[in-house]
Image (cartoon, grey):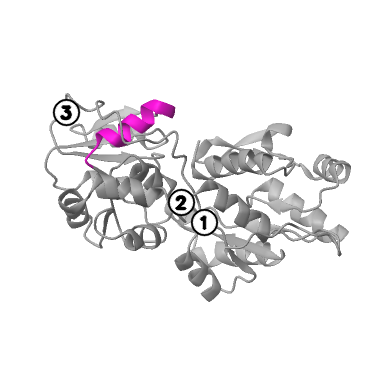
């Protein structure tokens, strides 16, 4: 589970409710190998021929390539060879992830990503700051596509999960990996206690380095909602996320957010004002300001403005027809 998976899974459910039939071709249909340094992610092995048969048999009205892995590259090659136009999305900062893990210069990986995405007719981006950054890097055909939050799942009550821990509770939720910059949060001198919800390749090393932190493991569903709602501040230390769905989930549970002024936080939190959290280059200051000025009712009300239905309608309007003359439903803002 990660933000991309949650986005696409929710998108599929919303598309079905709108009467749109979508076929997902994912790695589960192919022989796979674990991604180097991140075995939970599976990479398809030599998918070209099988993928081509699937795409021809399904004959879609519109094609969207969700990720830039082996399947995405094979789909792009097929589409260009057969004259199919398509859209893509910029979900993940792979150049920064690769730099953090391998020290590969970001200019090289951004050059490759630019060629990949510019081959399509629409690149969907989640925030205005990301759109401007990618435009400056030479990416074309940029189209806005925000995110939503499940307001039925993420609720402000109950708030009983961290009752045995000292207050205030500063919470991190997400994957435990080097690119998430979690140590920047755990190193902070803050009152109360720090809680980490999530799993990932950095779990063991973070536990050894920060024995005073409460590591609660991965959570889902109602338990995850209670974890958010029971905290006083959710701290989002990432500098590489393109949006940060966990921020909306926290706000929906009434918990303000502290973050660096990176893509995602500065787009989402600044528009909501100090009642929903604080964005600052000093993460400790941001956390304490969110604790002091955060308002649970305001957090929930702001989260309610992020609708998955609006997100899905925008996605549909961003699609491009594979064949000339085909109408794709467009939704007004």
| Residue at image mark 3 | 165
Is the residue marked by circle 3 packed among few (<14), some (14-19), or many (20+) residues within 10 Å?
Answer: few
| Residue at image mark 2 | 306
Residue 140 appears anywhere in the view: yes
Residue at 65% across, 59% down: 331
Start-end of magenta stretch: 219-232
- Helix, strand or loop under label 3: loop
Q: CA distance from mark 2 to mark 3?
A: 32 Å
Residue at 41% across, 48% down: 304
Q: CA distance from mark 2 to mark 1?
A: 8 Å
Q: Nearer the viewer, mark 2 or mark 1?
A: 2
User: Mark 2 touching mark 1, by CB under 8 A?
Assistant: yes
- Magenta span: predominant SS is helix
Is the residue marked by circle 1 packed among few (<14), some (14-19), or many (20+) residues within 10 Å?
Answer: some
Q: Earlier in the sequence, mark 2 or mark 3?
A: 3
- Helix, strand or loop under label 1: loop
Does 291 sit left or right of 254 as displayed? left
Spot occupied by residue 28 in the image (x, y as percentages of width and height): 68, 32
| Residue at image mark 1 | 146
Does 169 sit left or right of 27 as displayed? left
């Amino acid at each position: 589970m990660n933000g991309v998976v949650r986005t696409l899974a929710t998108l599929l459910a919303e598309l079905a409710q709108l009467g749109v039939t979508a076929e997902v071709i994912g790695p589960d249909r192919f022989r796979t190998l674990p991604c180097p340094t991140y075995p939970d992610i599976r990479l398809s092995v030599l998918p070209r021929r099988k993928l081509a048969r699937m795409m021809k048999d399904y004959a879609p009205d519109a094609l969207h390539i969700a990720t830039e892995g082996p399947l995405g590259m094979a789909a792009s090659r097929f589409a260009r060879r057969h004259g199919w136009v398509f859209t893509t999305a910029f979900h993940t900062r792979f150049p920064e992830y690769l730099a953090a893990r391998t020290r590969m210069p970001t200019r090289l990986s951004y050059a490759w990503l630019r060629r990949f995405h510019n081959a399509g007719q629409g690149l969907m981006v989640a925030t205005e700051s990301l759109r401007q950054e990618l435009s400056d890097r030479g990416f074309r055909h940029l189209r806005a596509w925000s995110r939503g939050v499940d307001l039925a799942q993420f609720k402000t009550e109950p708030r009983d999960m961290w009752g045995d821990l000292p207050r205030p509770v500063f919470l991190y939720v997400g994957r435990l990996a080097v690119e998430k910059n979690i140590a920047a949060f755990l190193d902070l001198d803050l009152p109360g206690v720090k809680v980490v919800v999530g799993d990932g390749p950095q779990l063991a090393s973070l536990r050894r380095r920060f024995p005073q932190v409460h590591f609660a493991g991965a959570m889902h569903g109602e338990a995850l909602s209670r974890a958010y709602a029971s905290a006083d501040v959710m701290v989002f230390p990432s500098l590489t996320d393109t949006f940060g769905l966990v921020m909306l989930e926290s706000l929906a549970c009434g918990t303000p957010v502290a973050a660096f002024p990176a893509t995602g936080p500065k787009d989402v939190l600044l528009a909501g004002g100090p009642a929903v959290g604080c964005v600052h280059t000093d993460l400790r200051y941001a956390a304490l300001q969110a604790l002091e000025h955060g308002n649970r009712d305001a957090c929930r009300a702001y989260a309610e403005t992020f609708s998955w239905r609006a997100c899905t309608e925008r996605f549909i309007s961003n699609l491009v027809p594979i064949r000339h003359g085909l109408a794709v439903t467009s939704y007004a803002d």
